[in-house]
Image (cartoon, grey):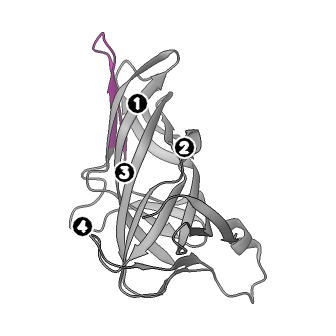
């Protein structure tokens, strides 16, 4: 997937969609072919591309994320994506340690109205094997954070861009608040069950493909 963004072809943010007149057609994730394999990764480079989670009084920052899912129809108002995070760190004040972020049995369900659910498309619920984040300092103190199923997290916004190869892709920006989690460990600044978690940033680019390995790329837009 070509990542250099050249032309912004449409800005169809979810917030705009919610404020549009009732007679306006709802925005959708649109692929020029079906079914489409949806592949994604961090958008561009630098801080804006980082996936930054705030929970337990610490920050967990991942430089890379790989997303994948399937869109069965050309137009859809929701999209389920699995995620794999890498190159992660946990930051507590002036101390930064390596961290792991595992989705386990959880997935992201994106809605075109800008809401995001944490759910599962497998036979086991996300609450059985929740998202886990963990870091440990040199003294052996650790912070373990678990994020289970929840719905209606706000907000995500989406736009259509055109890449250097001339194909339309969707860029998404995630600024989610009110994430429920449970934190344990002496390296956390807050422990217990809380509802003040957030994902501060997390821009991604999503492309649609005929085949996950080497198939043709479809146009993929948010309109």
Q: Position of residue 179 (x, y in %)?
A: 50, 47
- Residue furthest front as drawn: 165
Question: Viewer-nearest of labels 3 and 2?
Answer: 2
Q: Position of residue 10 (x, y in %)?
A: 69, 73
Label 3 to label 4: alpha-carbon separation: 14 Å
Question: Viewer-nearest of labels 1 and 4?
Answer: 1
Tell me if residue 143 is in the magenta stretch: yes
Q: Which mark is residue 167?
A: none
Q: Which mark is residue 89?
A: 1
Query: Helix, strand, or loop for circle 1?
Result: strand
Query: Which of the marked residues, 1 or 4, is nearer the chain's N terminus?
Result: 1
Q: Is disc 3 surrounded by few (<14), some (14 to 19) or many (20+) residues within 10 Å?
A: many
Q: Which residue is mark 2?
A: 198
Query: Helix, strand, or loop for circle 2?
Result: strand
The part of the chain drawn in magenta is 132-148
Label 1 to label 4: alpha-carbon separation: 28 Å
């Amino acid at each position: 997937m070509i990542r250099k963004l050249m032309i912004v072809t449409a800005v169809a943010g979810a917030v705009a969609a919610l404020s549009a007149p009732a007679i306006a057609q709802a925005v959708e994730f649109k692929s020029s072919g079906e079914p489409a394999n949806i592949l994604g990764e961090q958008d561009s480079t630098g801080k804006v591309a980082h996936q930054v989670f705030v929970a337990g009084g610490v920050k967990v920052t991942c430089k890379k994320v790989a997303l994948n899912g399937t869109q069965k129809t050309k137009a859809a108002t929701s999209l389920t994506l699995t995620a794999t995070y890498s190159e992660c760190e946990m930051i507590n004040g002036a101390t930064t340690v390596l961290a792991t972020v595992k989705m386990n049995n959880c997935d992201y369900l994106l809605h075109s109205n800008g809401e995001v659910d944490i759910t599962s498309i497998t036979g086991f619920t996300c609450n059985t094997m929740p998202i886990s984040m963990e870091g440990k300092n040199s003294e052996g103190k650790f912070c373990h954070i678990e994020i289970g199923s929840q719905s209606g997290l706000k907000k995500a916004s989406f736009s259509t861009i055109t890449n250097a190869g001339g194909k339309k892709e969707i860029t998404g920006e995630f600024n989610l608040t009110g994430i429920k989690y449970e934190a344990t460990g002496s390296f956390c600044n807050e422990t217990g069950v809380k509802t003040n978690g957030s994902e501060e940033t997390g821009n991604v680019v999503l492309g649609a493909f005929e085949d996950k390995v080497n198939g043709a790329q479809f146009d993929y837009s948010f309109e």
